[in-house]
Amino acid sequence: MESPRVDTAATYLDWNATAPMDAAAIDAMTDAARRWGNPSSVHGEGRRAKAMLEAARRDVANALGVQPEAVIFTSGGTESLGLALNGAACGARIVSDVEHDAVLRQAAGAHICPVTADGVLDLEALERLLVEVEGPPLLALMHANNETGAIQPVEDAAVMVRAAGGRLLADCVQTAGKLRMPSADFIAVSAHKLGGPPGVGALVARCLDGLEAVQKGGGQERGYRAGTENLPGIAGFAAALAARAADRCWLDRVAGLRAAMESRLRDIAPDVVIAAAGVERLATTSAIRLPGVVASTQLIALDLAGIRVSSGAACSSGKVRASHVLSAMGWSAETASETIRVSMGWTTTEDDVARFIEAWAKLAARRGK
Ligand code: PLP
């Protein structure tokens, strides 16, 4: 079965929001649904379900390069982050100010560490915070930013946090299946960003010491996450991760597409601004400011042209609001409001990018008319 496109008539460039599901993931889910059972039941169906669950756990661990015992299945990125932020023993929590709302809104009272103008964690500010806070710290830092793609200095931060007796939680929702996982103590992963179904993910807990369940109930997931496991979802998650692990070349191809696209946009409108252009970015992601045209106008015009992109941050209501990421990088509300996000994935083609450039060029040409 071919991997389905989201909408064959449209050009989908919003992969950081969600990715089309892999055919292999759909097959694995259907298979798991047919061979249903509760992994906690002791009878035949239960034992069969348990074997499928543990096979999926091994596959996920293998693809992420971690130990199977470290994998705790959850309902996705948000829950995984919440489990580490609220379940891991620590004296103080520190979060960067460009974290996803899934971190910022589940870490009330956390110390906020600023980023540089390029949207990368300010390591000197972190150093100062680590001296100030009381008790072993838990730092939450994303591997790559979902709006700009800026890769964060996770390894450097891990060394500093561990030297202060603390632990690091890496939000790898945008990088799992794409980049090598960092050596963080906790890693949050979500299936729907990598070709699996929504509503399933994992917290990789390399260190289970002091970790307490947040969602309590039955003793599933060795007591760290109660609730009957979403076996079809988990099977789809494992199959999608295996598909990503089997082909790492697409990311280089997409890096080439993005470089060509950004260079073309600069030719068309020399005043275009690409956020975090000066630092290493996830190859799929481009945050593009077209001065003089608000993002909502750009989104509508592009959507009418059959091109799906997003503004930096859209809340679940679908309303566009100012991006806290660009604002943390020192952008004004006005400049941030002129910025859209283009994000690519494994089936993105040169034609997709060409269609986007053509429609964007029309928007740029209309300015001042
Ligand atoms: N973290 C980042 C960086 C994200 O981009 C997202 C989703 O957009 C999340 C966390 C939340 O993941 P989920 O949708 O699986 O809850």
Image: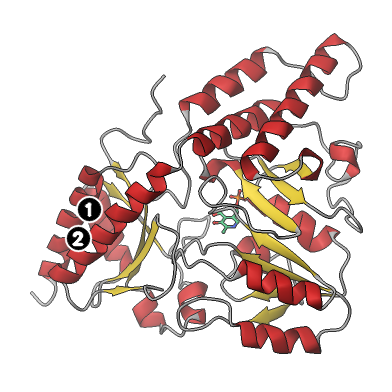
Give the image quarter of residue 241.
Answer: top right
**Where residue 85 sits in the image (x, y, percent)?**
77, 62
Amino acid type, label 1: Phe
* Residue at image location 53% in from the left, 76% down from the top: 120
Q: Please indicate whether residue 326 sits to the left or right of residue 25 in the image.
A: left
Amino acid type, label 2: Trp
Q: Please indicate whether residue 121 sits to the left or right of residue 276 in the image.
A: right
Q: Secondary structure at mark 2?
A: helix
Front residue of 168/29: it is 168
Residue tagged 1:
356
Q: Secondary structure at mark 1?
A: helix
Give the image quarter of residue 165.
Answer: bottom right
* Residue at image location 11% in from the left, 68% down from the top: 366
Residue tagged 2:
360
Question: Mark 2 near mark 1, Cβ–Cβ under 8 Å?
Answer: yes
* Residue at image location 28% in from the left, 53% down from the top: 257
Q: Quadrant of the C terminus?
A: bottom left
